[in-house]
Amino acid sequence: MSNLGDIFYLAVLVLAASAVNGRLAWPDAPYGSIVAVAKLTSRDKSSVVRGSMALVWPRPNMGNASVSLNLTGALDQITMAHIRLNATDTPIRLDLLPRYPDTAPVPLNPPLSFRGIMGFTVPFDYLRVGAWDPDNDHMSFIQALQEGLLYVSVQTAAMPGGALQGKLECQSPCMFSIGGGVVYAGR
Ligand SMILES: *[C@@H]1O[C@H](CO)[C@@H](O)[C@H](O)[C@H]1NC(C)=O
Ligand SMILES: *[C@@H]1O[C@H](CO)[C@@H](O)[C@H](O)[C@H]1NC(C)=O
Ligand SMILES: *[C@@H]1O[C@H](CO)[C@@H](O)[C@H](O)[C@H]1NC(C)=O
């Protein structure tokens, strides 16, 4: 009798743990792509919003790279969303919302508020990623991704330092691959 009780108790614990620590599923991607996900959580405990992000960067000539981001709940006056480097001054490494023609961040005008679900997908390429790098090198983005130094930040008028954040987790080997090997990003 006590065995049955123990098993039930264990199952509940496992379910509870996976709900808290559950990793996001890796998105579908062409073979050999760089793939990363992030779980976005609110930095303001009183606001009810969470989100997820998926980045897919196919190897050269295997399709377009994109970032898709979903938010669930409610958030007022979103001004910007970026992928940033976790370093002093948290420089931008990719613009998500709005998209800029250049690399000078300009907030959404007017800001965007939502209730329910909001999602968008933006394309990018090695040129766009390179444009945000001081050395104009798209490999710096991949290296930062490998080192776990990139995160998504969604800013609002009330929280310009970031209302939601989530660290990018990259799927191993976090490099373009062909067969058993890895290749560097082509142009
Ligand atoms: C966002 O939502 C769409 C539609 O439900 C889904 O197809 C996509 O996988 C989601 N993306 C992420 C990163 O959660
Ligand atoms: C990639 O992007 C280009 C330019 O936006 C578009 O013309 C093309 O159809 C896209 N290719 C795929 C496979 O989605
Ligand atoms: C930035 O890095 C520090 C130190 O590793 C870590 O504690 C913090 O959670 C990171 N922040 C983000 C937004 O990833």
Image (cartoon, rainbow, N blue to C red):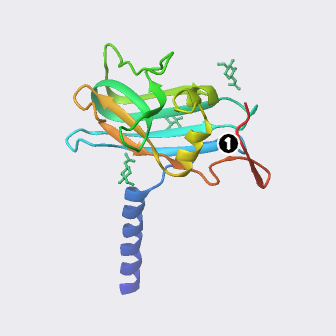
Determine if residue 81 is in view: yes
In the image, 24 versus 176, the foreground residue is 176
Q: Is residue 71 above or below residue 182?
A: above
Snapshot quadrant of residue 117: top left
Residue 18 on image: x %, y %: 42, 60
The residue at the point 28 percent across, 28 percent down is 156
Q: Is residue 47 above or below residue 111?
A: below
**Picture quarter with ligand 2:** top right
In the image, 182 versus 55, the foreground residue is 182
Q: Is mark 1 within 8 Å of ligand 2?
A: no
Q: Residue furthest left?
A: 46
Snapshot quadrant of residue 64: top right
The residue at the point 80 percent across, 51 percent down is 179
Quarter of the rendering occupied by the C terminus:
top right
Dot 1 amino acid type: Ser
**How many discs mark residues in the rendered view?**
1
Q: Is residue 98 above or below residue 70?
A: above
Q: Which residue is mark 1?
A: 33
